[in-house]
Amino acid sequence: MTMATLILLDSGPLGLMVRAPNKPQVVHFNAWLNAILAAGATIIIPEIAHDEVRRELLRIRAVGSLRRLDFALDPSSGFRQLTLTPDAMIRAAEFWAFVRQTGAPTASPDALDADARLAGQAALAGGPGDAVTIATTNLAHLNRFPGIDAQTWDQIR
């Protein structure tokens, strides 16, 4: 069995992917994305990140970005989607409890903790020997979850 390099996009990088392509930060992101794909990585769009990005794009009525998001989610795009399964939710609940028990929560008690859910998805995303990394713009929260590899997207090679 071959090992895979799986890169899960947090909402920050996913948001960059779907923004207007002529913005300097988006050009930089797209160059990184092309390089990581050329290196053989599999790009995964987790359902929780999809939800975070879509709801904001709907709120601001960003029609072009919504079109690009829909394209990224189309199976022909080459990106893989990762649904939020019951097992991922159980793992997310364990992460949520852990960070609160250690006094380092990643969200207020009444908030939907998307970081815990993303970590739950990442924990179950790969198979034995696979390298699973969350590409993010916010390491502070994701690095609190044990066993989760999160890196700033432009540092992933």
Image (cartoon, rainbow, N blue to C red):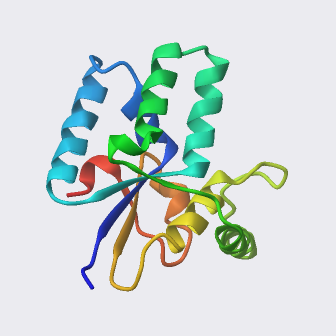
Instruction: Give the residue displayed 56% in from the left and 35% down from the top.
Output: 53
> Quadrant where the N terminus lies?
bottom left
> Quadrant where the C terminus lies?
bottom left
Q: Which quadrant would residue 89 be assigned to in this image?
A: bottom right
Q: Is residue 132 above or below residue 153?
A: below
In percent of width and height, residue 109 lies at 82, 55
In the rendered image, the residue lying farthest to the right is 110
From the viewer's perspective, tell me whether residue 21 is left or right of residue 37: right
In percent of width and height, residue 61 lies at 60, 14
From the viewer's perspective, tell me whether residue 79 is left or right of residue 32: right
In percent of width and height, residue 31 lies at 19, 37
In the rendered image, the residue lying farthest to the front is 76
In percent of width and height, residue 152 lies at 35, 52
From the viewer's perspective, tell me whether residue 131 is left or right of residue 144: left
From the viewer's perspective, tell me whether residue 152 is left or right of residue 63: left
Q: Is residue 73 above or below residue 115?
A: above
Instruction: Give the residue displayed 65% in from the left and 30% down from the top.
Output: 55
